[in-house]
Amino acid sequence: HQRGREMEGMNTFDIRMSQEPDGLKAAYKIVDCIKRRGVCVCEANAPDQLLESAYYEAMELFEDGAFGPPLRVHDDRSMLESQLWGQALKDEDKVVWVRDAGATSGATTSASSSSKMNALKLLAKNMSDFAGGLGEPLQKEMNLNFDRIGHAMLSCYTGDRQYSLHLDNSHGEEGSDNEGLPDNGMRLTATYYINTHWEPDNGVEGGLDVFLSNPRETPSSASDAKKCPKLRVAPHADTLVLFLSEKMAHRVVRTQGKDLKWFALTVWTLNGAAMNQMSKKLLAMRSRAAKQDSDSDDD
């Protein structure tokens, strides 16, 4: 496919990994970009054949009916967890989780589909390794800490849809009068596009808008974030977008029609201590809700 023309046609890359012989220096360049504006757009330099295989696998999964909702709600705790993770997964209704054992989703995944995940699993591992390599410079330069990386999420964007502006982790400040939702642990979001069929004439459907607010502060509201300059990223293959999960408001660019399907892999770096606290706060929230129900029954 004509990747070279695509690169010149749409996305402007902050970093091209093909031009970075020193991985550690590249990591610091990426973090410097994230520190300055909250987001960095990279050309990851994955082999064309790997990308084409991953796209083919994604299409096969879609045709097999493997995509489904990202979260399953089956009890009170999972309902509370869905509210927290739902910040990041707000508009995701066609998802496959790419795990070492294969693909899992809210829908049933056939054994044949799970066995056809080699390229997607390799890309997911490469993404995790890449994100992990940013840990030291993120800690040194931005005091941003994470100690684990979540499973990769394969998303499909298609049909006539508008998508919501959101933060992946819009928690309140610890100890404030209005703590809001607990910290879900997400620190850095990494989204990677695998659409080898993308052409400049397709525009940016299924791509990403990131609103360039001050990366040192959380936007006070969606309307304030919308007043900031907008970085628009087309969903063509080998585009990796990295941004601060707690600071950068973003949304998927609206899609139209069912003929074209746009696929993206996303991983989140996670802070284990925050996730443990989240679990405790979830239990406390559930206890308070149960007590309120009990008090209401007594009345």
Image (cartoon, helix red, strand yellow):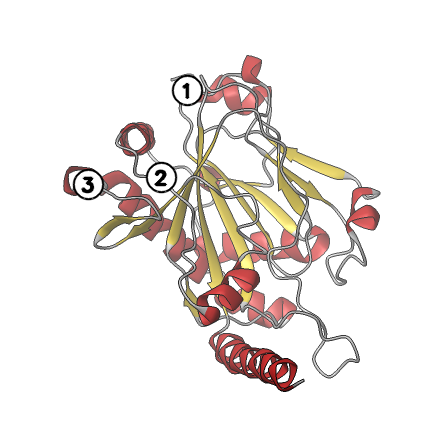
Q: Which mark is residue 110?
A: 3
**Which of the two discs, 1 and 3, sits closer to the camera?**
3
Element marked by disc 3: loop
Q: Where is residue 5? Give x, y as percent.
A: 50, 17
Q: Residue at x 57, y 26 (%)?
A: 255
Q: Which kind of residue does numbered mark 2 sit on?
A: Phe
Q: Residues within 10 Å of mark 1 (few under 14, many from 20)?
A: some
Q: Residues within 10 Å of mark 2 (few under 14, many from 20)?
A: many
Q: Which kind of residue does numbered mark 3 sit on?
A: Ser
Image vertical order of residue 272 relative to residue 230, above or below: below
Q: Which residue is mark 1?
A: 197
Mark 2 or 1, nearer chain start: 2
Element marked by disc 2: loop
Contact (Cβ within 8 Å) of mark 1 with mark 3: no
Q: Where is residue 54? Give x, y as percent.
A: 31, 34
Query: Seen from this angle, which residue lies furthest front?
Result: 299
Q: Residue at x 63, y 81 (%)?
A: 292
Judge from the rendering whether residue 175 lies leftward or rightward of residue 81; answer left or right: right
The quarter of the displayed image where residue 71 is located: bottom left
Q: Which residue is mark 2?
A: 67
Element marked by disc 1: loop
Judge from the rendering whether residue 231 lies leftward or rightward of residue 85; answer left or right: right
Q: Where is residue 174? Give x, y as percent.
A: 70, 80
Residue in front for this viewpoint, 118 or 93: 93
Mark 1 or 3, nearer chain start: 3
Judge from the rendering whether residue 95 lies leftward or rightward of residue 200; answer left or right: left
